[in-house]
Amino acid sequence: MALNGAQFGRVLSYSDLAGELNDPEIGGFTVSTRSGHRPSTGWMVSIPGHEETFEPRTGTPGDLMTYAGRKHGGLREEGNYLGGWRSDAGKNVVDVSRRYDDTPRGHSESRAAQVTGRQEASFHLTSFETEHNPFHPTARANTGKAPHELADAAMKNPQFALRQPEVKAWIKNPKKGRS
């Protein structure tokens, strides 16, 4: 099953995506399975329950096609994309991610999605940088900083965490908040 990438002058295929996922120089992909569009700006945050991990050098075209078929409902939603990357642990990860605009508001929305979705991080397509969630228990491993004291509360009850001043400050002031 090929993705419609005609606007890019070629058809994108699961074979191409598997190649990008497994090539350490490229390191992954973000693509709409509806249109073939590949965003180059914005913040990407995984949608909870949609991540799958593959051993390095796996993540074949068949694996990606099967995954996309299982996650068809999430991938059909406007603003959602099929994403794949190599994790810090060297595993291939595939997910359904939501894209947030590359604006201060979009950045704040991506941070709120990290907290409510219990996600470790977001990915900034524009700069190719990962922004770790300080309210996630993995913060020390990811940033070298101790997890915020609200990390456990955020994992148990994200809605409670969103009402806390420290979390609100991090979400509302991306340039000023703790990252």
Image (tube, rainbow, N blue to C red):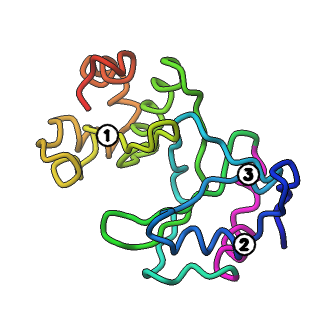
User: In this view of the protein, which residue sits in the foreground, 24 or 179?
Assistant: 24
Q: What residue appears at the point 28 percent right and 45 percent down from the top-left corner?
A: 136
Q: What's under tag 1, amino acid-wise?
A: Asn
**Residue mark closest to the camera, 3 vs 1:** 3
Where residue 92 sits: x, y (%)? 46, 71
Q: Residues within 10 Å of mark 1 (few under 14, many from 20)?
A: many
Q: Give the overall secondary structure of the magenta segment.
A: helix
Tell me the SS state at disc 1: loop
Q: What residue appears at the point 19 percent right and 46 percent down from the top-left corner?
A: 143
Q: What's under tag 3, amino acid-wise?
A: Ser
Where residue 59 sits: x, y (%)? 56, 79
- Residue 11, placed above or below residue 60: above
Q: What residue appears at the point 48 percent right and 18 percent down from the top-left corner?
A: 104
Quarter assignment of residue 68: bottom right
Quick one: quadrant of the C terminus? top left
Residue behind mark 2? 14
Q: What residue appears at the point 51 percent right and 36 percent down from the top-left corner?
A: 126
Tell me the SS state at disc 2: helix
Span shown in magenta:
62-77
Residue behind mark 3? 32
Alpha carbon separation for disc pair 3 and 1: 25 Å
Quick one: quadrant of the N terminus? bottom right
Residue behind mark 1? 133
Alpha carbon separation for disc pair 1 and 2: 31 Å
Alpha carbon separation for disc pair 3 and 2: 12 Å
Q: Residues within 10 Å of mark 2 (few under 14, many from 20)?
A: some
Asked if the stretch drawn in magenta spans residue 73, the answer is yes
Asked if the stretch drawn in magenta spans residue 41, the answer is no
